[in-house]
Amino acid sequence: MASPKAPAGHFSILYFASASTFTNKTSEYLSAPVEARGLFSKLEELYPGINDKVLNSCAVTVNLSYIEIDGDEAPDLKIVIKEGDEVAIIPPVSSG
Amino acid sequence: MASGTVIRSLRQQIASCESQLHDLKRQLAEVEHQSQQQRTNRASEQGVHTRDDPLAHDFSHGIHDDFKSEVLAALAQSEETAPPQRRWPLEANEYKRYGRQLIMPEIGLQGQLRLKTASVLIVGVGGLGCPAAAYLVGAGVGKVGLVDGDTVEESNLHRQILHSTAKVNMTKVESAMIALHSLNPNVELVPHQGRLTPETALSTLQHYDIVLDCTDTPASRYLISDTCVLLGKPLVSASALRTDGQLMVLNNPPLPPGNTSGGPCYRCVFPKPPPAESVVTCGDGGILGPVVGTMGILQALEAIKVLTKQPSASSNDSAPADPPSLLIFSAYSNPMFRTIRLRTRKLKCAVCSAHATVTPEALNSGSMDYVQFCGTVDPVDALSSNERISAENYAKVRLDVNPFTGLEPSKDSHILVDVREKVQFDLCNLEGSVNVPFSAVTSLPVGGRNGTANESDPEAGWVSELRQHADKPIFVVCRRGNDSQITVKKMKELGLDNGGQRWIGDIRGGLHAWRDNVDKDFPEY
């Protein structure tokens, strides 16, 4: 898990549950800055198919705060993910 | 079902009930003994005055009449109040039983009384529900309802701690009731046999103060959350898979839909269900006992916090609830716990916003189809019948002449590819089989032959390996017969069948069918 700070010019991204299964990673560093609205397309480029199979139903957080970027009118599309930020992709886990 | 198993199970249930009865009789004997002793003590105290002791002499002869009547009146009074008025709000045994939590300022007498008058509904008595119920019953919640439609299976026992070996095949509700009653007979337990449905949800949940979602499907999670919003009940929702867990206290405070001061609901956090084919069960993905146990225990903790919350000094309302959060538990990560700050209610939430479309009427009428909302996965049916072989016929291939190719029996006459993940392959496999994990199959780009992969890309090792033996038919097997079909399709897309010259097909029903129909000693897991 990417607890150490991201290298210069990067943010860290954490993948939980099915996001981790899909990317085969628990975390990585991606180049910053990036606007929240562009996050999913960037991930789709890296992991073709992840949008439909994982991201669509996920919660997304920046620095441990939930952001809403689902849909064209979502309130947080303009948030800029900066160098050193920590983003998390959190799919719903339903089993128990 | 072998009747022997039923007989054994019933015998064990009877033994369990008998030991419980024995325990109750012992408790009754103790209480009777105590009250007998108290009576004896009282009688002997009174006896002091009637026997020939010095005081009796003084009373009769030497003491002033006024004082004598005063003392006698006082004694007579204690006689009248013989069954004394209840002096303490809790029973004597409750002070002892709950003493360790009673002396904590977070609980105290008021907190314990709140627990005693509270009711909790636990939906799902499995890996989450068992530990949650144990701690809530242990803590002295007045009434606990249990909802489940399943029976206890052997594969449940490593994590579902209220169920025991003797209770395999018993309903989970019944099994949990026995364990919980012996843990704390003061708690009223209410069985709700069967799964929660949209038609039964409102009438089941309305009798409780707080609900714990301990279920295992997306559909039940939306149903329970929606119902809690409609009824104004706080909800403690948790889940777990493999080494990960999630926990949220939702609809807290439980204000009416449209009131933006109310806590968010499940739909606010996860408005869209995950695609049905991506949903992994504990049976397929695996689960570590302490991981799901941790989440269940945290649910009990959050429920206790909500139920014992002290009213704020300034107003009659309860103190403001903690800001909503999502706790993520990741057992093999560092740190293991992360707390995500959640938002308030979503402005356009379908249930808890002013624009709500989910209503009690819609729920009761059955017009809300949660299963459809979350999607269903049909068993894979991707192959034609001449691309499939039954487990029995494949057994003949290994021992007999191949019905498709006419080849003599031999393990070397064909290639058997097992597409279960390596950890499962290592548990048990058929002799001579080759492991190509399904994750390696699906991660291989399909467009390889259409020019999307450039020439410098080396072909995946297993693909070139299979190309080398172009004459041998390929049989693909997996656990239950779904992944094997998808693999056969993929192999043909990759051209491994040499334009139809080589037979590639799957073993219908997978190793499950192999065990059922060919080799009953093959391990079941």
Image: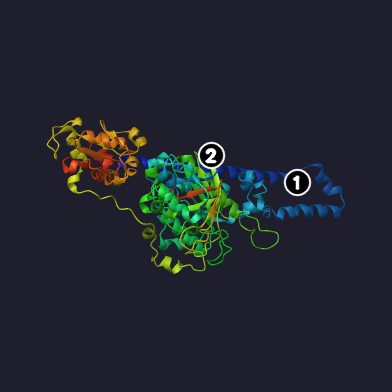
- Marks 2 & 1 on one chain: yes
Which numbered mark, 2 or 1, is in the foreground of this view? Answer: 2
Task: Give the SS element for disc 1.
Answer: helix
Q: Nearer the viewer, residue B401 or A64?
A: A64
Q: Could you tell me the amino acid type at mark 1?
A: Thr
Q: Residue furthest front?
A: B455
Looking at marks 2 and 1 on the same chain, the residue that comes earlier in the sequence is marked by 1
Residue B138 in the figure: left or right of residue B402:
right
Q: CA distance from mark 2 to mark 1?
A: 77 Å
Q: Residue furthest left?
A: B406
Residue B414 in the figure: left or right of residue A44:
left
Which mark, residue B334?
A: 2
Q: Nearer the viewer, residue B86 or B316?
A: B316
Measured from the top left, where is residue B89 in percent x and y?
Answer: 66, 53
Location of residue B437 by image quarter: top left
Q: Chain of mark 2?
A: B
Q: Could you tell me the amino acid type at mark 2?
A: Asn
Q: Which residue is mark 1?
A: B50
